[in-house]
């Protein structure tokens, strides 16, 4: 018997949850009955619906990030990061866009002794570095904040984007990103430099791509053509 669209969707949900008991539906069922069957299907905690990691968070994050066509590079310290940038991007015609990175233990960034940096992300075909709040191991995604020090638009206008994260800020799954998103604090005499309030967060997985036109994948349609994730160990 041919499945209805509803049955196909719920069968897919059941499969994703590791269950083989997808409920059946009929066209004459009431909305309440449909809701009851759906509730029965998804009575499973988010944690148990996710396959446990068979490796460390860093290893799994790296594997998933590479699977989404992101490049992953590990750095021991700021000097190692500068060595990489000098070797790969010192010949650029435009300066490198960057933002403050004190939150990921790079308080002296940027170091302008070897490279030319800028805070103008509107320059075309530009390479830039952005700090991230952290990463999500199950998808290889990076979590970027938007506040007075970090511009959302930079993540969409750069042609090649390098996101810097701390290895300590990688969480296992999406539901845990609240652990790496600091709560805003009020400025006071005791706390003259409070935590910034984030206007929003952006979760990015791999370089920008779309297949809306003729089902042909195009990179860089809505953001960077290339994503590099730099992990500070």
Image (tube, rainbow, N blue to C red):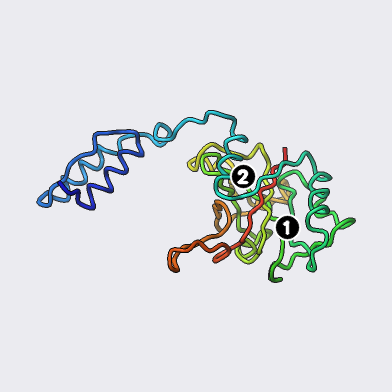
230 versus 168 height, above or below: below
Residue at mark 1: 99
Q: Is residue 214 left or right of residue 207?
A: left
Q: Residue furthest left?
A: 28
Q: Residue furthest top?
A: 54
Q: Which SS class for mark 1? A: loop
Looking at the image, which is closer to me, 187 or 91? 91
Name which of mark 2 and mark 1 comes first in the sequence: 1
At x 21%, y 46%, the residue is 35
Residue 88 horizontal/vertical position (percent): 78, 54
At x 74%, y 55%, the residue is 100
Residue 91 horizontal/vertical position (percent): 82, 62
Residue 13 horizontal/vertical position (percent): 32, 42
Would you call the spot at circle 2 few (<14 residues within 10 Å), some (14-19), or many (20 or more)? Answer: many
Looking at the image, which is closer to me, 130 or 225? 225
At x 55%, y 42%, the residue is 64
At x 90%, y 56%, the residue is 113
Residue 18 horizontal/vertical position (percent): 34, 33
C-alpha span from label 2 to label 1: 16 Å
Looking at the image, which is closer to me, 183 or 218? 218
Would you call the spot at circle 1 few (<14 residues within 10 Å), some (14-19), or many (20 or more)? Answer: many
Q: Which SS class for mark 2? A: strand
* Quadrant of residue 121 within the rendered picture: bottom right
* Quadrant of residue 208 within the rendered picture: bottom right
Residue at mark 2: 134
* Quadrant of residue 155 within the rendered picture: bottom right
Quadrant position of the C terminus in the picture: top right
């Amino acid at each position: 018997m041919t499945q209805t669209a509803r049955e196909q969707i719920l069968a897919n949900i059941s499969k994703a949850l590791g269950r083989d008991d997808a409920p059946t539906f009929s066209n004459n069922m009431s909305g309440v009955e449909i809701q009851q069957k759906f509730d029965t299907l998804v009575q499973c905690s988010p944690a148990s619906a996710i396959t446990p990691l068979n490796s460390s968070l860093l290893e799994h994050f790296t594997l998933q990030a590479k699977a989404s066509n992101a490049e992953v590079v590990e750095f021991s310290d700021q000097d190692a990061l500068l060595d990489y940038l000098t070797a790969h991007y010192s010949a650029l015609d435009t300066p490198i866009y960057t933002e403050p990175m004190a939150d990921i233990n790079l308080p002296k960034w940027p170091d302008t002794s070897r490279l030319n940096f800028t805070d103008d992300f509107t320059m075309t075909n530009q390479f830039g570095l952005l700090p991230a709040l952290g990463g999500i191991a199950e998808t290889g995604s990076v979590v970027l904040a938007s506040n007075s020090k970090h511009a959302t638009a930079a993540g969409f206008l750069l042609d090649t984007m390098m996101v810097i994260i701390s290895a300590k800020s990688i969480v296992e799954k999406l539901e845990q990103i609240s652990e790496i998103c600091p709560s805003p604090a009020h400025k006071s005499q005791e706390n003259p430099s409070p935590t910034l309030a984030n206007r929003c967060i952006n979760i990015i997985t791999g370089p920008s791509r779309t297949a809306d036109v003729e089902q042909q994948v195009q990179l860089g349609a809505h953001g960077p053509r290339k994503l590099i994730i730099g992990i500070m160990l």
